[in-house]
Structure formats: C-alpha cells, structure tokens
Amino acid sequence: MSIVIDEKILGIWYVCFDDDMDVMLALGRTETGYEVNGRTRLYLGDPDDPWDEKDRKRWFGGGVEATTDAEAVSKTRANMIVMSTDFAKTFKPKTAPAIFELVRGETTVEEFAQVLRSMPWAHSMEATRH
C-alpha cells in the first residue's frame, strides 16, 4: 500500500516520534465523500536508507464524515492531533511529537508534490525506465 498524490489529495499529516517511529496520514476526496489512508512505521533498518524495506509498516484507512473540503481537513487535523497524543501516551517518546501538516488548498497536484518532496521528512522515489 502507499499514499497516492493525485487530483483527489487534500492534505498530508506527518508525525515523528523520536528517531524510531512515525505516522503519516493522507486525506483525499472520493466519489461519495472523503477518506484517509495512512500508516505507522517503526524504524528497523538502516537510518540512511529509507528504501531498505526493513521497517515495520501498518496501513489503515477509513471514511471522513464531512460536507466540504475545509470540514474534512479540519476533522482530519483534529484526529491526527488526538492520534498523536494517544501514541505518545502509549509509546512514551523521549521528545514531544513533531507534527507536520501540508494542505493542498488551491495549488496544483504538481505544486503540492514539489512542496511535499522538499519537506525534511519526505522520501520520494521517482519512477525510472530500464
């Protein structure tokens, strides 16, 4: 599973817990409303190689009850804060969780993806042909 950046994307939230765990959540439009897709990741591999496939990831998703993009963003933001607080209570990180939010707003998908790739926590893989 992965988070897809396409015309339906409204925002991405990323929370870092110390150097060994993070949570990422994406909000998008569907034919009938809104949905989130996300994952938790426990770092088990080489910290200098995000593609080594040794990390343990757990994927999840679900609907968001909202009638507008703004309401869906607001509810997702609030849920991410609650989820991050609950994770912090459970896993007791050494530092306070760092929460990052990137909302698409009126930007194009390409502009959103460019800003996303520039985030210090983002890892992106370009498709190549062999």
Image (cartoon, helix red, strand yellow):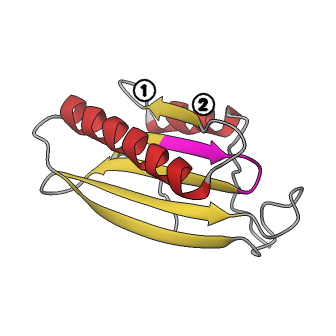
**Residue 32 badge:** none
Whether label 1 touches label 2, CB < 8 Å: yes
> Taking the image as drawn, is residue 6 in sight?
no
Which residue is drawn at the image coordinates 47% and 42% (left, top)?
A: 12
Tell me, yes or no, whether the highlighted magenta stretch contains residue 40.
Answer: no
Which residue is drawn at the image coordinates 39% and 59% (left, top)?
A: 37
Q: How many other residues sit within 10 Å of disc 1, few (<14), some (14-19) or many (≥20)?
A: few
Which residue is drawn at the image coordinates 60% and 39% (left, top)?
A: 97
In primary-sequence order, the first of circles 1 and 2 is 1
The spot of residue 6 in percent (x, y) is 42, 49
Question: Quarter of the image holding residue 50?
Answer: bottom right
- Number of labels in the image equals 2
Q: Quadrant of the C terminus?
A: bottom right
The spot of residue 120 in percent (x, y) is 73, 35
Question: Quarter of the image holding residue 52?
Answer: bottom right
Q: How many other residues sit within 10 Å of disc 2, few (<14), some (14-19) or many (≥20)?
A: few
Asked if residue 74 lies left or right of residue 52, the reply is: left
Answer above or below: position of 45 versus 100: below
Asked if residue 7 lies left or right of residue 95, the reply is: left
Q: Secondary structure at mark 1?
A: loop
Tell me, yes or no, whether the highlighted magenta stretch contains residue 18.
Answer: yes
**Amino acid bearing label 2:** Val
Q: Secondary structure at mark 2?
A: helix
Answer above or below: position of 121 versus 125: above
**Residue 107 badge:** 1
Question: Disc 2 designates what residue?
Answer: 115
Start and end of the magenta stretch?
A: 13-20
The spot of residue 8 in percent (x, y) is 33, 48
**Amino acid bearing label 1:** Thr
Toward the top, the furthest residue is 106
> Taking the image as drawn, is residue 129 in sight?
yes
Mark in the foreground, 1 or 2: 2
